[in-house]
Amino acid sequence: MKSRPSLSNYPTSKEDARETAREPLTPQTVSPSFHLSYTDIDFLTREELRPVRLQLELLKPELLQQEHGIEATVVVFGSSRIVEHEIAAQRLDEAKAAAAESPQDPLLKERLAVARSILRKSHYYDEARKLGALLSKLKHHGTGCNIVVITGGGGGIMEAANRGAHDIGAETMGLNIVLPREREPNSFITPELCFQFHYFSIRKMHFLMRAQALVAFPGGYGTLDELFETLTLIQTRKIHPLPVLLFGKEFWQKLLNFEVLVAEGVVGPNDLEIFRFVEKAEEAAEIIEEYLNSKKL
């Protein structure tokens, strides 16, 4: 991040940090109490400093997006486990071979069934990649700015959407989060727009701050968490309505019986109009483009 030139008579924080690095080593200067607060990681990571870290995690991506002129995004969610067809087919062959060697092993049988299921869903990788390219060609009608595809930064569907944008030379963003697994960002994210988060709450806020639409491909707990947070915010009018598109009607209707919520009286019939099902990238892009063209300053 480039700092603006300062006209202040006071030294900058960077200048003072460089000065302290030149201090002679004495019992006083090596004491943690002597370290500048903003260079002291042990201090910044104290439990009492959580409010400060929350603010920093909100502010850093915001400033960088402003500097890149990003005003409008489309969020693409989906499973990191849904890979492209060639990889899925290879993993199925490996699962078949392993199961053939130990046909009575229940774990290998389960892995074989999962590999078959992932292969059946591998076409979603292609659709997400195609969608990433289509969306990156769109502009916000009100502001004239380019649409930037934003994902969770991981593999699978997220990789595919970032890859589609990358295919046509467009900027694309990834919001990674520190996890025990799946930590490495995919290689198709614009490096200057590849962020890492500690707090889920701040990360989810950044997903929606500039969002003009949300597309959810089949996914697991993470996808469901992000999808239902968005549905809740739209339902409760905490954010303005925007297109929420669920890719793969068969998957979503098998997973979630939305009509039960209406029948049980816990949501209203109109709440089912917050989202709609789509099957093809072109269909999703057309819906989003129509929405963008309807927006006014």
Image (tube, rainbow, N blue to C red):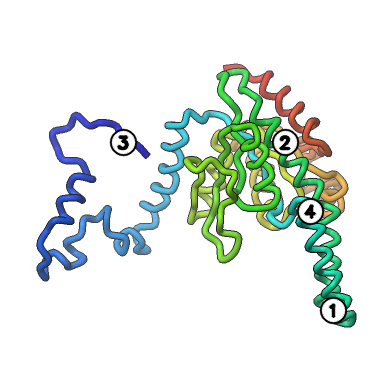
Residue in the image at 80% along x and 31% along y: 283
Q: Residues within 10 Å of mark 3 (few under 14, many from 20)?
A: few
Callout 1 secondary element: helix
As measured in the structure, the alpha-carbon distance from the residue carrying label 3 to the one carrying label 4 is 45 Å
The answer to which image quadrant residue 97 occupies is: bottom right
What amino acid is labelled 2 in the image? Leu
Q: Which residue is mark 4?
A: 86
SS of the residue under disc 2:
helix
Q: Nearer the viewer, residue 187 or 30?
A: 187
Rendered-image quadrant of the C terminus: top right
Q: Nearer the viewer, mark 2 or mark 4?
A: 4
Distance of label 2 from label 4 (alpha carbons): 19 Å
Q: Is residue 14 above or below residue 74?
A: below
Observer able to see residue 241:
no
Q: Earlier in the sequence, mark 1 or mark 4?
A: 4
What residue is shown with label 1?
106
Of mark 2 and mark 4, the one earlier in the sequence is 4
Instruction: State the residue position of label 3.
Output: 3
Of the image marks 3 and 1, the number of the one nearer the N terminus: 3
Mark 1: amino acid = Pro
Left or right of 183 in this view: 17? left
Could you classify mark 4 by the number of other residues whose Cα lies within 10 Å: few (under 14), some (14-19), or many (20 or more)? few
Disc 3 to disc 1, how far (Cα)? Answer: 58 Å
User: Which disc is residue 131 wearing?
Assistant: 2
